[in-house]
Amino acid sequence: MFGLYFDDYTTPVFRPPSEANSFILRVTRGCAHNKCTFCAMYKDVPFSVCPDEEINGQIQLAAHYACQQVRRIFLADGDALILPTDKLLHLLEVLYGTFPNLQRVTSYAGPKDILRKSDEELLALRNAGLKMLYFGLETGDTQLLQRIRKGVTAEEAIAAGQKVVRSGMKLSMMVIAGLGGAAGSEQHATETGKAVSAIMPDMLSVLTLRLYKGTEMLKQFEEGEFELLSPAGLAQEVHTMLEHVHFDGARHCLFRSNHISNYVALKGTLPKDRERLLKELEISVGKLSKLTDWEVYTNMEY
């Protein structure tokens, strides 16, 4: 089944790769935070909550055209979890009552959105069918979080991730290789590995920093305030991060770095495949060190 999306198409839609075949139900527009220096996703989209009639209209259209085919629903845009818990619980009840083959509902979740919910609220949402959250940790380095204007400290971001895991929801977490540039690479990698270990998500994805038009980070690069990591440096950074990732025996985590932005495609399960992944990265460092400067700069998106 192809992904379903019913809306007026006046603003862009973003969703995780794993939601390609999902019904994309827009319940908010844009991102309430919308200050991260590296992100261009919703820069020109004023944040707003979609009116109930608009949400209901999307549900009715999907039910009319693909009621039996809808098995997964992703709540868009970037801040669905900002909605009051009572409203989300009602929405989940409507969705599972409307689509007989619905298996799961998922959403992006910012750290502030998670922290605003109590443990009891998250548990109630999990029991109602909100089965997975996508959480952009980005880094476990507090200083870097401040520089990229994420709006939380590492301690707060870790607490948010732990809160999701504690609720029983699946947690799919993203970190960004190269986010600290050449100067901050070691600290970014080390502290991110420690944060991942403290949270122990169900899924961990490593993306590579790209510089997009209109972002503060691109401006910093153009003004010489930010030095990109080389491809070999990126592989070494992920290696350092994994060296600091330690899971206890009761948890396992699906690990991926096969996003289109990555130079090195890796997949495995932590902690089982950790040593293999480290060896693959060591080999990649040697291969990538031979790339030219031009091949380094093709990682940017002007």
Image (cartoon, rainbow, N blue to C red):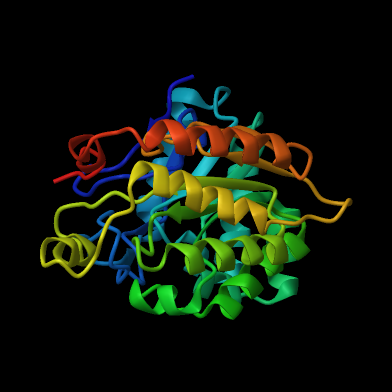
Q: Where is residue 87 in the image (x, y as percent from the top left)?
A: 55, 65
Residue drawn at 71 percent across, 42 percent down: 274
- Quarter of the image where one finds residue 42: bottom left
Answer whether residue 116 is visible to the viewer in this image. no
Against 104, residue 200 (above or below) is below
Residue shown at the point (48%, 28%) measured from the top left: 21
Pick the front one: 232 or 32: 232
- The x and y percentages for residue 88 are 57, 61
In screen coordinates, is 133 left or right of 223?
A: right
Q: Which of 132 and 6 is in front in this view?
A: 132
Count of marks, rendered view: 0
Taking 203 as reference, is 124 left or right? Answer: right
Evaluate whether residue 120 shows in this view.
Answer: yes
Is residue 139 positioned above or below 301 on the image? below
Q: Residue placed at 62% from the left, 60% from the top?
A: 193
Q: Say which residue appears at 21% left-offset and 37% top-offset.
A: 298
Outermost residue on the top side: it is 1
Where is residue 221, by image quadrant?
Answer: bottom left
Position of 149 with respect to 275 (left or right) is left
244 versus 278 height, above or below:
below
Across and down, in percent, residue 48 comes to 31, 66
The location of residue 251, given as percent across then percent down, is: 82, 50
